[in-house]
Image (cartoon, coloured by chain):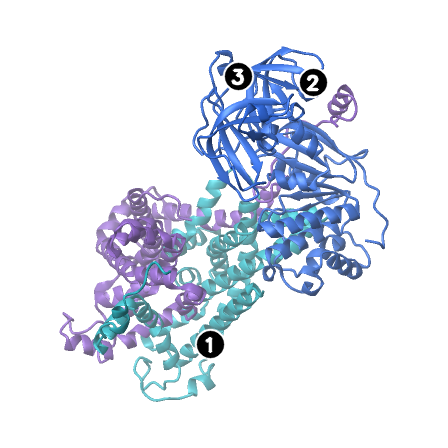
Amino acid sequence: MATEAVKQVEDLHLVRLTKRYGDHAAVDDLSLTIPAGSFFALIGPSGCGKTTTLRMVAGLEVPTVGMIRVGDRDITALRPYKRPVNTVFQSYALFPHMDIFENVAFGLRRRGEKNVDAKVNEMLELVELTPMARRKPAQMSGGQQQRVAVARALINRPDVLLLDEPLGALDLKLRRQMQIELKRIQTEVGITFVHVTHDQEEAMTMADTIAVMNSGKIEQMGAPQEIYDTPHTAFSANFLGQSNMIPGEIVERGDVITVRAFGQVFTLAPEKLHTDSDRVIVGVRPEKLQLTREAAEVPSGRNMVAGVITDASFVGVSTQFLVAAPWGQELIAFEQNMSADDRPVVGDEVILSWEPSHTFGLDGGENLNAGIDGDLLEVGHYTATDAEAGLAPTPAVGG
Amino acid sequence: MATSQIDPALLEAPPAAESGLQRGLRWIRENSLAIYSGLALIYMFLPVAIVVLFSFNSPAGRQNTQWNEFSLDAWRNICKDPTICQSVGVSVTIALVATLVGTILGTMIAFALVRHRFRGRSSTNLLIFLPMATPEVVLGSALLALFLNMYWGDWQMPLGPWTILIAHIMFVISFVVVTVKARLSGLDPRLEQAAMDLYADERATFRYVTLPLVAPGILGAALLAFSLSFDDFIITNFNSGSTVTFPMYIWGAAQRGIPPQVNVIASIMFFGALGIVIIGQILSARRKRTRT
Amino acid sequence: MQVPASASAVDTYLADTQMVDTPGPVSPGTGLPTKRSTPYWLLLPGMAWLAIFFVIPLVSLFSTSLQSPVSDNPDDGFYFNWDFANYSEALSRYGEQFLRSFVYAGIATFLALAIAYPLAYFIAFKGGRWKALLLVLIVAPFFASFLIRTYAWKTILADQGFVVEILNALSLLPQDRILNTPLAVITGITYNFLPFMILPLYAALDKIDPRLAEAGADLYATPFTTFRKVIWPLSLPGVVAGTLLTFIPAAGDYINAKLLGSTNDRMIGSVIDSQFIIVRDYPIASALSFLLMAAILALVFIYVRRAGTEDLL
């Protein structure tokens, strides 16, 4: 928007935010600072409290305990219509009895702003909906409605724009398009976007910073790549992408951490270890695993596991393999389909190997299945107590 | 090449033809429900048709129950008997006031029930439901009993237009509550949240979002209230004293003979109300139509 | 990027400002806090009206029913006397009309159900785009005055009329006429309260997912069995609501009886009416009215218990 200067925005502070319904805490002592002008994503499974948090920032829920500040201004007690915050709702919530023009103009009119017509037309141009100005929401497609919802919120130049899973109802192609659109608008306008979603790919695509939420608390926060490469908990490891997790014990510390698990030895960098305990879980992402037939073919220094292929699924770009390790656990590996010949098949013996730098280490007490969607493939039934008892992990439960 | 082919022999022999009768019977069987419904609707409209038809009748005697000859006389002289028009005037006036008061009171209750939490919710719902479930005879006679017991020395509560009005407001409230409640519960609360998010305070939200969206429900309730009040007989009869409303006129005239002017008025009310409802339906259908 | 200032500084701040458990009530609709007093202001006028002009009259009715005449001269009025004998007298004098009212209303309700069900079924399942229009057509006859429509049946069922002549030709009429017989009264009642049966039935049937019927067919049920085992049970709430909304007003109705029946078809509503307005025997009249309400409440209670649905509205 060349006609107006980029707005001066401030950080958004959530301080010890708690929302309790009876005994159940939907949001539990949550504190975080969202930097001004960033694209911030709050992700987590349904019921984790991310939407409740968003609504508290909007003023549509009253916190049980806690404080919300924009810069130095305490907005906790303010009604939604007094806050410099606007929301793009999941269901768009466009006013059905008003046309698009009036919908977008709504906020401006309520605040008694001048030049409403000019501003609305400019905004409609930004979201490329100028010819539809006099149509009603019911006469527009989902993608168009979504753009109206964004326009309606953005036109008020809020300090913070909240987006509650706005792309959920769109089909894949449209969603991809809108992701790029929203990112572009955010960069241009320069205000803080807080985007709530359960789609981790979407969050990683769009956000500068991601916070992973679980049961009302924040598991981990950081840049997408940071969290992806170095998850701190099993939940983060499983929620963002997929992970293989092998429980073991630290046998040596130093420049390199050495872990023994089921008779195998793995190494990892100390920066990637997120626990003080000696009982750890060795983690590696499936796409980092390379399949070879002979141990001799594996470059030196790499971590290795020998196994037998129990499943191979061709997914076009890649092939997903399930490999049974000697101790029974099934490991997942993704390999890009680089060559058509000599593809491993079910029953083949292979060596899985990966760079130590791709290894991350979690606390041994973590639940391996945290953060995994109920119906999906589990990374083997295994808990810390099983490790203690010296039991081997049971193979994954069905596909 | 093709793994399955159609046997050419099958393509040559056409299926056995149905006789006209068979086809007819099959059509009846498949559409029996529709035919029945059509007949049922005709059955429901039959008396209305008679009413309208006989407004064009010039009855031989006093009773307008047998067709005599076509005449526009009743339409041209609606107020030949001034008491008829007077009674219509009384009914319309009472209906208008009862509608106004009843709709306001009922709408307020509906809002309280849907948009607020309070103790005694179920008793409130019960109290609203009861008048609809009580026979008019009981409602009317109970009110009469109340009015009869309202005396102080020589003064006795007079039965007349005011007591009728009181009675009508009473039984209309429940219907308004139910109608508005239905519309209000269907209103997506996220719309009001969106309005507040967009700088509309409670009053502005109500004015620009809630009210326009509930308005059709309130209007429907008002229409319902008006027709219930205008057409009421039993409750009115108990509490009217010497006042005569339109239904009471009809009742009084039933033994002697109902003049065709009554049919005229009833026909006007019928087509008027039907017209309003149909126009309303067309407007709302047009509003909802989706264009790609 | 966690808590901005030191944790203790924030805690102090929070302790100073009172941010404790969520204050006050919240609207179940918008989820936003509302004033505690608001609902009561909204409710007051309307509920007060109902309390004064519905509840108190019923009390008045009951109290009047317990009054006794001051003297043999009716103009001397009545006094309160805990005279429960009024009830037994009312019953013994007018028990026949009571019974007749319930019988006629019952038969009419049953007929209304039989007529309304297929119609409601048709609109709900086969109505398609015409649903709204059909519903308007159902309600439309109500726009013409109830009394005049009932009166119109006198023409339709007239002794020399079309209908009676055909039925007579088929020798279906025991008395060679319809008017001034119970048949006319029941016909009138059925007709008048038909929409009260159709609309709740429609509402319940419309809620049924039509794919349930498809599932039934897929699982080897004949259309009749599908109806009996799937559609009918699911429509029961509508059946209960419809029969109640029809039976209750029908039991108290006397317009049909007066216009279409003979003096042998007198219903209890008519008795109450004449006792109040003509005879002015208020205690007996009130006792009758109260008995009517009590009887209906009792029947409704038993019926609803048996049908198992409590939530009608």
Q: Is C57 on the left-hand or right-hand side of B93?
A: left
State which chain is coloured purple.
C
Q: Is B43 on the left-hand or right-hand side of C40?
A: left
In depth, the one of B28 and B162 nearer the eye is B28
User: For the residues carrying marks 2 and 1, which lies nearer the camera in this image?
Assistant: 2
Tag 2: amino acid = Pro
Picture quadrant where residue C31 is located: top right
State which chain is coloured blue.
A
Tag 1: amino acid = Ile
Q: Is C7 on the left-hand or right-hand side of A215?
A: right
Residue C210, visible in the rendered structure: yes
Residue annotated with mark 3: A384
State which chain is coloured cyan.
B
What is the secondary structure assignment of the residue under circle 2? Answer: helix
- Measured as percent of width and height from the top left, residue C216 is found at 30, 51
Tag 3: amino acid = Ala
